[in-house]
Image (tube, rainbow, N blue to C red):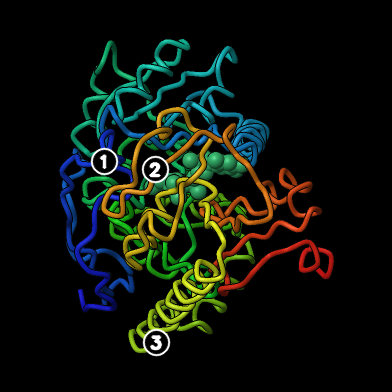
């Protein structure tokens, strides 16, 4: 891989501190470009066990947008594919897979974080607590944990494949487990949207790969898999939902025109071009620097800056910008497991959402900018009373009631 951007040595975004003075490990965060496959990814990484374990704090069910999102795609898949067997890789809180319960469908979830795997097991969903790889895939078909599962008509994985370090073993396992006519649905942040919207904060240790259609197809072909459809979906600042099948079943699928259209856009934005990508990183960092300047100015003008949503993304940017509790008073989040903990590195405290006091001397930094619509609707009163948000996506700017009305 050839280096695109060095973001420095940074703490693991979601490894929140219970005590302010807990020790923090830092790992280099360097993004690179693979000339052969055109994949953008991290050039080295922290051990998966340090990031995805029984203390993992991200719970996708905390956002109504995500609850609706997973219900919709589950219902759509049930109708479209009528699967007899479904496997989910990286099931988190069970937000997707629980929609397949009690439907005479063979259902299996794989989730490495024990806190979440236990939760879905208790809800009656067969869940294996393990990292996904080809060894696990083989053992699932051969009889682990109780008996040999059939191959699966539907394999679903949202925001997980991009976290897996060994893509070779990952895709070998998927190839092995997908039934002949089956579909593998992969959801992942879109590199096109990242580049278009300055989303520098998708680059943190949890995310190993940043797929485009161009790079994903280059990689999949090696395993006898191919993309036959793609949808650009709005979640997480713009993601792609890829529909993938066995190469030897491709002729049986309705190949979508969307694929060619989106590839054309990817080429326009230079997602296959090292120099253009490097320039895009420079722009992203420049925009982030503007955020720092605006926050410092607001602070000097006497405002309290409060983070809204203790996302992995805000953890990353505050650490890159070295904005600690001198600048950010606290961060609010609805997730009980995050509350009263501290962001590693900059040590800003996370408080429960119920403590929110949106008075006019506060400015809210939109940590969960990907749920902007949901949050602005929820905080209508604050905005109507003159409250403001600051965001860096797609460009550093202030959001108040007038900017919303003018859209
Ligand atoms: O891939 C990943 C994804 C999908 O999510 C992971 N590597 C980690 C995680 O990233 P994130 O932390 O940036 O995700 P979110 O979904 O942007 O997190 C939103 C956070 O904001 C949650 O902690 C819940 C919180 N929240 C809130 O406090 N009030 C969210 C909403 C909508 C709210 O109104």
Provide residue 92's location: percent of width, then percent of height. 42, 31
Res 386 quadrant in image: bottom right
Could you give the CA–CA distance between mark 2 and mark 1, rounded to whole angstroms? Answer: 8 Å
Residue 186 seen by the camera: no
Instruction: Kindly identify which residue carries mark 2.
Output: 349
Q: Residue at x 42, y 10 (%)?
A: 122
Observer-nearest residue: 211 or 175?
211
Q: Position of residue 150 (x, y in %)?
A: 37, 23
In the rendered image of this protein, does residue 337 appear above or below residue 333? above
> Sequence-wise, which precedes: disc 2 or disc 1?
1
In depth, the one of 165 and 87 nearer the eye is 165
Q: Residue at x 30, y 71 (%)?
A: 37
Q: Secondary structure at mark 3?
A: helix
How far apart are the alpha carbons under marks 1 and 3?
37 Å
Please, is residue 290 above or below residue 74 in the view? below
Q: Which residue is mark 1?
A: 20
Above or below, 206 against 53 in this view is below
Label 2 crowd bin: few (<14), some (14–19), many (20+), radius 10 Å? many
Earlier-in-chain disc, 2 versus 3:
3
Dots 2, 1 in contact, CB < 8 A: yes
Expressed as whole percent of the image width and height from the top left, the position of residue 286 reads 43, 82
Identify the residue under disc 3.
Answer: 279
């Amino acid at each position: 891989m050839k280096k695109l951007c060095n973001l420095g040595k940074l703490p693991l975004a979601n490894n929140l501190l219970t005590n302010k003075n807990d020790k923090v490990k830092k790992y280099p965060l360097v993004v690179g470009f693979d000339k052969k496959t055109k994949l953008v990814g991290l050039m080295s990484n922290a051990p998966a066990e340090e990031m995805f374990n029984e203390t993992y704090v991200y719970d996708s069910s905390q956002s109504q947008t995500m609850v609706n999102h997973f219900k919709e795609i589950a219902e759509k898949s049930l109708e479209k594919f009528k699967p007899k067997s479904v496997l989910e890789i990286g099931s988190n809180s069970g937000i997707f897979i629980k929609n397949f319960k009690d439907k005479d469908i063979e259902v299996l979830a794989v989730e490495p974080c024990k806190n979440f795997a236990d939760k879905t097991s208790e809800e009656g969903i067969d869940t294996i607590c393990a990292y996904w790889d080809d060894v696990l895939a083989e053992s699932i078909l051969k009889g682990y944990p109780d008996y040999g599962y059939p191959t699966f008509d539907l394999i679903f994985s949202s925001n997980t494949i991009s976290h897996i370090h060994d893509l070779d073993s990952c895709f070998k396992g998927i190839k092995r487990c997908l039934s002949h006519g089956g579909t593998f649905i992969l959801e992942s942040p879109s590199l096109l949207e990242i580049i278009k919207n300055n989303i520098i904060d998708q680059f943190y240790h949890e995310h190993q790969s940043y797929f485009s259609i161009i790079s994903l197809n280059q990689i999949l072909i090696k395993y006898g898999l191919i993309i036959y459809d793609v949808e650009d979906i709005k979640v997480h600042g713009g993601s792609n939902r890829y529909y993938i099948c066995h190469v030897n079943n491709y002729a049986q699928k309705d190949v979508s025109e969307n694929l060619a259209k989106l590839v054309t856009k990817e080429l326009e934005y230079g997602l296959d071009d090292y120099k253009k990508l490097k320039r895009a990183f420079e722009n992203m960092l420049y925009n982030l620097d503007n955020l720092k300047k605006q926050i410092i100015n607001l602070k000097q003008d006497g405002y309290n800056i409060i983070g809204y949503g203790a996302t992995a993304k805000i953890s990353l940017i505050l650490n890159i910008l070295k904005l600690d509790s001198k600048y950010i008073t606290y961060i609010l989040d609805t997730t009980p497991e995050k509350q009263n903990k501290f962001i590693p590195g900059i040590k800003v405290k996370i408080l429960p959402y119920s403590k929110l006091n949106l008075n006019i001397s506060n400015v809210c930094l939109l940590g969960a900018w990907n749920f902007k619509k949901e949050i602005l609707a929820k905080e209508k009163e604050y905005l109507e009373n003159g409250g403001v948000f600051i965001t860096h996506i797609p460009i550093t700017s202030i959001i108040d009631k007038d900017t919303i009305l003018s859209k």
